[in-house]
Image: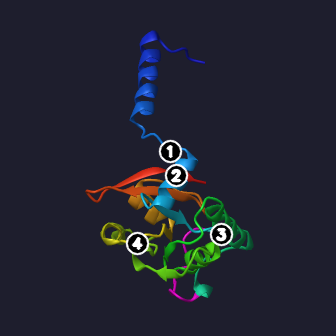
Amino acid sequence: MTLLTRTQFAAFGFLVLLCTLSRPALADEASLWQALRGGDAFAIMRHAIAPGTGDPAEVVVGDCTTQRNLSAEGRDQAATIGDRFRANGIDAAAVFTSEWCRCRDTAEGLALGTVVALPALNSFFGQYERQAPQTAALKQWLSAYRDSRPLVLVTHQVNITALTGVYPASGETIVVQRTTDGSMTVLGRLP
């Protein structure tokens, strides 16, 4: 085992302090739910558990037999997440989803309201040339969106990471605030 010199130890301590100070403070869970209820933020969530990665080569949107789909555990997870929204005062929401079956099935499993397909939420996994224009289209849509109901978006990991910088787990919800200049601020995560 190598011992650190005083200089190395001090530099390491400074780096730890710098990383701690530069990270945005994440809100506690109660304030995240309050922000969603009050319309100060929106929820963007990764679809529930769908075993595997990506999709087969010949995906046909609307044909679930050509896609990776939710498992029984994933369907249960979606229902549990919907229950969690209701337990935190959100009985109904404006719900938009990717056209992929695993996202649509997650959105419907939440049982928070009518589910509307939003192509800007479709996966671009394996087609990364679509990342920038599609993320810009989603930001533009979010900037123009107006509704008094809480907003829930169900999409894919790549879309969430491109928008927020967060790599979410299956079924994880990221709470995001839109700012007046059109940028996005991550308030926190609801695992």
Q: Earlier in the sequence, mark 3 or mark 2?
A: 2
Whole-percent x, y for residue 92 in the image: 56, 72
Q: Residues within 10 Å of mark 1 (few under 14, many from 20)?
A: some
- What residue does disc 1 label? 27
Of the numbered discs in the image, which one, if any, rests on residue 78? Answer: 3
- For residue 114, which quarter of the picture? bottom right
- What residue does disc 4 label? 147
Kind of residue sitting beneath label 3:
Ala
Whole-percent x, y for residue 26 in the image: 49, 43
Q: Residues within 10 Å of mark 2 (few under 14, many from 20)?
A: many
Q: Earlier in the sequence, mark 4 or mark 3?
A: 3
User: Of helix, strand and loop, which one carries label 2?
Assistant: helix
Q: How many labels, in total?
A: 4
Mark-to-mark CA distance, 4 and 1: 24 Å
Kind of residue sitting beneath label 2:
Leu
Q: Is residue 18 visible from the viewing direction of this image?
A: yes
Range of magenta residues: 53-63
Q: Earlier in the sequence, mark 4 or mark 1?
A: 1
Whole-percent x, y for residue 30 in the image: 57, 49
79 w.r.t. 186: above or below? below
Q: Nearer the viewer, residue 118 or 178?
A: 178
Q: Earlier in the sequence, mark 1 or mark 3?
A: 1
Q: Is residue 51 visible from the viewing direction of this image?
A: no
Kind of residue sitting beneath label 4:
Asp
